[in-house]
Amino acid sequence: MKTIRDIKIECVRGDISKQEDISAIVNAANAQLRTGSGVAGAIHRAAGPGLAEECRPLAPIKPGDAVISGAHNLPNDYVIHCLGPVYGQDKPEDKLLANCYRNALILAEENSVRSISFPAISTGVFGYPMQEAAQIAFSTIKDTLPELKTVKEIRFVLFSEEDLKLHEKVMEEVL
């Protein structure tokens, strides 16, 4: 864990749909904001059908975009949906991935969110290499910190022990 500018940044292993102490969770969404596999599937299953209904008029979104919805049956206030780039297909993938993190944090700030949890966006079926994605994520957060006034906690929720260790290492290097 790190604290920079009174903002706590941490990495944990777990299920992003079970972050009961967090105001907003980030969904690694698809363009149509529908139930998918991985993070999107877990969030939609836990939130219930109301999430898909609320998201329908917000879609489609483009890579790098972020939109916000209610959390429905989740223990959070909001879900921020980000469409990450497909590695090797959506260009420039590094800028698009950085936009996901930046736009999510800006939306959180605009909605008076005090705490936010991120998954490792684009690293699942979208194929982004985990190390490179983590470096982009933490660099973007570092660059965005001066703009944050309401957000006081940023948490990365990783699926595996290996992903957790890699994110902790990159966080130490970048921050």
Image (cartoon, rainbow, N blue to C red):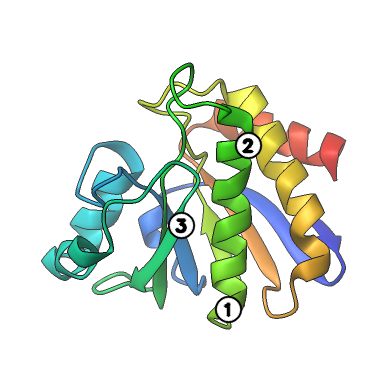
Secondary structure state at the residue bearing disc 3 = strand
Mark pair 2, 1: CA separation: 22 Å
Secondary structure state at the residue bearing disc 2 = helix
Left or right: where 118 falls relative to 71: right
Is residue 120 in sight in this rendering?
Answer: yes
Farthest-out residue, bottom: 112
Q: Residue at x 66, y 25 (%)?
A: 132
Could you tell me if the residues under marks 1 and 3 are in contact, i.e. CB atoms within 8 Å? Answer: no
Q: Nearer the viewer, residue 161 or 123?
A: 123
Secondary structure state at the residue bearing disc 1 = helix
Q: Residue at x 52, y 39 (%)?
A: 120
- Residue, disc 2: 95
Mark pair 2, 3: CA separation: 14 Å
- Looking at the rendered structure, the kind of residue marked 1 is Glu
Q: Where's residue 3, x and y in %?
A: 83, 62
Q: Nearer the viewer, residue 4 or 28?
A: 28
Q: Residue at x 23, y 56 (%)?
A: 44
Q: Where's residue 72, x and y in %?
A: 25, 74
Q: Where's residue 42, x and y in %?
A: 27, 49
Q: Where's residue 8, x and y in %?
A: 75, 64
- Residue, disc 1: 110
- Looking at the rendered structure, the kind of residue marked 3 is Ala
Could you tell me if the residues under marks 2 and 3 are in contact, i.e. CB atoms within 8 Å? Answer: no
- Residue, disc 3: 66
